[in-house]
Amino acid sequence: MKQLLRTTDPTQIVYAKALLSGEDIDCFEMDVHMSVLEGSIGILPRRLMVRDEDFAQARRILKDNDFELEDL
């Protein structure tokens, strides 16, 4: 799996997951429960992971929808 998106904004994660599921791309959200350790203040980023073979297409989908992604 590869990291597609890392953000502290939960709305970006929800939107990205909706876009990807609309294109039948499976994704997995990591670090969801880290808020327990940080005290629920939202400073630790969540990561959205996709399969290696879906990475390029998923990246294009998010870029086409104005997501700012980290450079490879």
Image (cartoon, grey):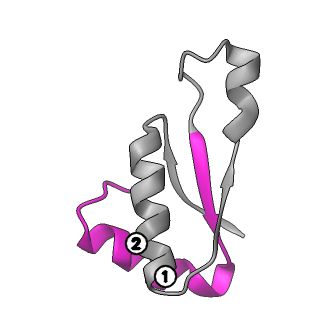
In three-dimensional space, the C-alpha distance between marks 1 and 2, rounded to whole angstroms, equals: 14 Å
Give the mark, 1 or 2, whose residue is nearer the N terminus. Answer: 2
Front in this rendered view, residue 40 or 65: 40
- Nearest to the eye among marks 1 and 2: give it: 2
- Say which residue appears at 67% left-offset and 80% top-offset: 52
- Image coordinates of residue 60 in percent, x first then y, are 36, 78
Q: Quadrant of residue 26?
A: bottom right
- Say which residue appears at 72% left-offset and 70% top-offset: 1
Front in this rendered view, residue 18 or 58: 18
Instruction: Name the amino acid type tagged 2.
Output: Leu
To which residue does mark 2 refer?
19
Secondary-structure class at tag 1: helix
C-beta proximity under 8 Å, tags 1 and 2:
no
38 left or right, relative to 59: right
State whether residue 58 is above or below residue 23: above
To which residue does mark 1 refer?
56
Q: Quadrant of residue 57?
A: bottom left
Question: What segment carries the magenta color?
Answer: 46-70
- Say which residue appears at 72% left-offset and 29% top-offset: 34
Using the rendered image of the protein, determine whether residue 31 is visible from the camera's viewpoint.
yes
- Image coordinates of residue 10 in percent, x first then y, are 47, 40
